[in-house]
């Protein structure tokens, strides 16, 4: 979209320049090409997938398909293809139950540079899509005997039904508005929770924030903005150099803050270091240590937060987690939070009360519940 828009506008501008020079034939040619490129923008913007109770609505560049929800997750397939060994690409396909021609869902695709298991990444996206549809009630959970993904969501033996894991609101399944906390529910970390024993035995826990690459980016770009703006001011006294200097200083401050950012956890609480240090008390429940996930075309990211008793969200910069690791960022972050909670319980810093505190921000609360369902589903697959 950006390429078409930029080249289209450039072609029109070049045509206008030729028109002022008297070359009307050149003006007509370049302006025509520019308008044609801009006219293609609606087609480029058209591809999308809309998921609702009515099914899967596919809008490809030249075609549209309104597909019912399939009876099985196996109807959604990642069709992987390679191009000269330099680019790996996988496109989702919908395979109708009647055996008719598969329908490509082009907006659902993964592209990676080089040879990689891009099909597995797209399969994870389709797992997310199916788990979301199950959670919304659009499709029925499949039986493990059918060879499809397990239902998850608190029903898997040894995980969802484990005392204190599936039954504690917000830890296995977030409670609905009509699901009050029962006094007899199990509490705390699950007996089957994945704990980092080495981390559990440390006298205190420390997590570094963003990596050196992010710090170098902010500092380097800030210095570049300041140097360029000062040079422009010295040469022509341009007013626009002042905002450039201010923006460069802001990036430098942000870079220093990122370099200092870390989380130190001890018996007193969570100490978030940076230019503005903050300390948060231990929560009353494991449910208040929250993992949320973000997805891009090639990566997944896990974020950690603390929900305070008044519902406010506090970010915990625990550092990046690599999707291509053994557990992936979702299960990796769940393991880290499980271990933090177990560490606090072992040292008497906190005690599970079973309290579930809804987040004040509705969007974050929805992301929180979606992440709980995702963790439940992934652990049922293991």
Image (cartoon, rainbow, N blue to C red):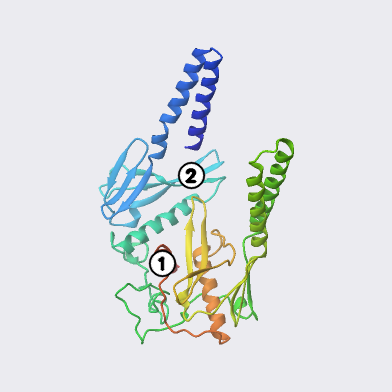
List x then y, in percent, for residue 206.
64, 73
Crowd class of label 1 (few under 14; some 14 to 19; many from 20; radius 10 Å): many
Q: Quadrant of the C terminus?
A: bottom left
Give the left or right position of residue 190, taking residue 266 as reference. left
Residue beneath disc 2 = 89
List x then y, in percent, for residue 48.
37, 45
Q: Is residue 244 above or below residue 205?
A: above
The mark closer to the camera, 1 or 2, is 1
What residue lies at 50% left-to-right and 37% top-to-bottom?
2
Image quadrant of residue 311?
A: bottom left
What residue lies at 65% left-to-right and 50% top-to-bottom?
246
Q: Secondary structure at mark 2?
A: strand
List x then y, in percent, for residue 331.
50, 67
Q: Is residue 264 above or below residue 52?
A: below
Q: In the rendered structure, which disc, 1 or 2, sits on the residue that comes first in sequence?
A: 2
What residue lies at 50% left-to-right and 20% top-to-bottom?
30
List x then y, in percent, for residue 242.
66, 45
Q: Nearer the viewer, residue 326 or 185?
A: 185
Give the left or right position of residue 210, taking residue 286 as reference. right
Q: Is residue 204 above or below residue 27?
A: below
Residue beneath disc 1 = 365
Give the left or right position of residue 355, taking residue 142 as reference. right
């Amino acid at each position: 979209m950006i390429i078409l828009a930029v080249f289209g506008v450039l072609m029109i501008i070049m045509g206008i320049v030729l028109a002022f020079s008297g070359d009307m034939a050149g003006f007509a040619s370049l302006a025509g090409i520019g308008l044609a490129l801009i006219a293609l923008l609606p087609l480029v913007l058209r591809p999308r997938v809309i998921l609702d109770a009515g099914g899967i609505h596919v809008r490809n560049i030249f075609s549209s398909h309104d597909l019912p929800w399939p009876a099985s997750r196996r109807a959604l397939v990642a069709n992987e293809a390679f191009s000269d060994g330099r680019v790996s690409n996988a496109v989702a396909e919908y395979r109708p139950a009647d055996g008719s021609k598969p329908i490509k869902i082009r907006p659902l695709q993964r592209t990676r540079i080089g040879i990689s298991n891009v099909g597995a990444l797209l399969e994870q996206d389709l797992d997310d899509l199916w788990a979301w549809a199950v959670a919304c009630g659009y499709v029925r959970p499949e039986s493990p005997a059918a060879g499809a993904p397990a239902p998850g969501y608190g029903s898997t033996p040894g995980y969802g039904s484990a005392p204190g894991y599936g039954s504690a609101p917000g830890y296995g399944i977030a409670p609905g508005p009509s699901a009050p906390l029962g006094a007899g529910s199990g509490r705390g970390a699950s007996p089957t929770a994945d704990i980092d024993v080495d981390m559990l035995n440390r006298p205190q826990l420390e997590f570094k924030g963003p990596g050196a690459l992010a710090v170098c980016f902010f500092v380097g770009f800030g210095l570049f903005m300041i140097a360029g703006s000062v040079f422009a001011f010295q040469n022509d006294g341009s007013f626009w150099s002042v905002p450039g200097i201010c923006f460069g200083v802001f990036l430098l401050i942000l870079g220093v803050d990122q370099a200092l950012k870390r989380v130190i956890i001890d018996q007193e609480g969570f100490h978030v270091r940076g230019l503005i240090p903050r300390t948060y008390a231990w929560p009353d429940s494991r449910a208040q240590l929250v993992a949320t996930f973000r997805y891009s075309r090639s990566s997944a990211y896990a974020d950690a937060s603390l929900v305070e008793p008044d519902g406010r969200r506090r970010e915990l910069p625990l550092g990046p987690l690599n999707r291509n690791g053994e557990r992936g960022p979702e299960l990796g972050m769940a393991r880290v939070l499980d271990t933090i909670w177990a560490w606090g319980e072992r040292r008497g810093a906190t005690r599970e009360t079973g309290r579930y505190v809804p987040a004040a921000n509705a969007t974050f609360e929805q992301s929180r519940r979606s992440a709980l369902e995702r963790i439940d589903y992934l652990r049922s697959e293991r």
